[in-house]
Amino acid sequence: TTVRKAYRIGFSQCTNGDAWRLAMLAGMQKELSFYPEVTFRMKDARNSSAVQQQQIKEFLREGVDLLIVSPNEAEPITPIVEEAFNRGIPVVILDRRTTSKLYTAYVGGNNTEVGRIAGNYISSLLGGRGNVLEVLGPIGASPALDRHQGLTQALAAHPGVRLVAQVHGNWERPSVIRQLPAVLRAHPEVDLIFAHNDRMALGAYQICKQQGLSRRVRIVGVDGLPGTQGGIQFVQDGILTATMLYSPGGEEAIRTAMKILHRQPYDKENLLSTMVIDSTNAPTMKLQAEKLRSQQQDIQRQQQLLQRQRDTYANQQTVRYVLLAA
Ligand code: FRU
């Protein structure tokens, strides 16, 4: 039998406070269950770049074998990631990026493409003519900047569709609830709201409903999580016209990390694909997600069964040993 090395992985997460991040962690844990010899620790920076810098420093002091980092903001997290990389500690960047090429691998969506595909979808939805309001994430975070750039690139090809207003959100619903009413009053011409994630899109819907606009103004989000509070359900319920799939990538991050640690070939850029989820495919997506969930439960049951059999076997070996010794 081969003894597998007890690697330590440190995961610096910008926030662990929403369903998308919890899905990311669940994906990681699922993949990690195949590597019981690996010690995995997460530190949650709770949306603070200063806290995240400190936590990455702690990981370096503690001596991890590999770092996974999802940077809260690109600029402030770049130097400490470069330092880790220059010290020879492999770094997997997940979802949000730094501003540097000094990292071992990236796993996550192509956010420029998310914005571009959304922009093209929006333009055809509006029949090439209409006014768009954009609800952005903090542009210090790479997905917000990239989604915005992708959107404007796509809209540039459709001169009849204009970006007429912006709301700068912080990824969370309350930031939209607070700011959107005034912006909508100043811009009654808005036909469609593109929000950088489904939580902010839900906030936009609630304000539109309050102002009696929910029939007129269409809303498109990003993330497309399964589950009752996820974007797929929002599309099915008619709250959102569409959402752009943005996978959390937890499984892929651990798979890439393990390839790096085992010195197997790996790709530096691991881009997860996106697609439009609207009323035409939301039911299929929902069914698929439910099927995946039940398969995952089966796998867990099989793992428990295997563990029980291993325990029984270990007990029998002990009995045998005791009998032989007697
Ligand atoms: C989760 C989240 C997602 C968004 C992503 C961008 O924390 O806000 O909703 O797509 O981060 O990094």
Image (tube, helix red, strand yellow):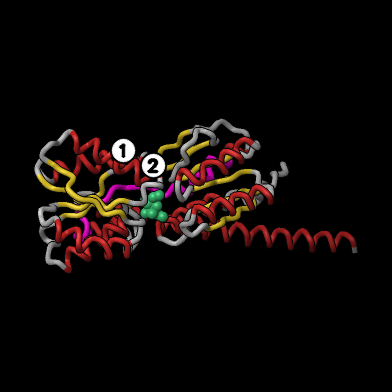
Q: Residue drawn at (50%, 46%), measured in percent from left and top? A: 76
Is 123 drawn above or below residue 177 in the view shown? above
Which residue is at the front of the view, 118 or 141? 141
| Left or right position of 141 against 152 | right
Asked if the residues shown at circle 2 and circle 1 are in contact, with their CB atoms under 8 angstroms apart, the answer is: yes
Which region is colored magenta?
236-258
Outermost residue, bottom side = 210
Q: Hey, which quadrant is residue 233 in on the image?
A: bottom left
Q: Is residue 244 magenta?
A: yes
Which residue is label 2 attached to? 109
Q: Amino acid at mark 2?
A: Gly
Q: Position of residue 104 (x, y in %)?
A: 55, 35
Give the distance between the C-alpha atoms of the residues marked 2 and 1, in whole angstroms. Answer: 8 Å
Give the secondary structure at mark 1: helix
For the question of whether residue 287 can be seen, the reply is no
Which residue is label 1 attached to? 113
Cβ of disc 1 within 8 Å of ligand 1? Answer: no
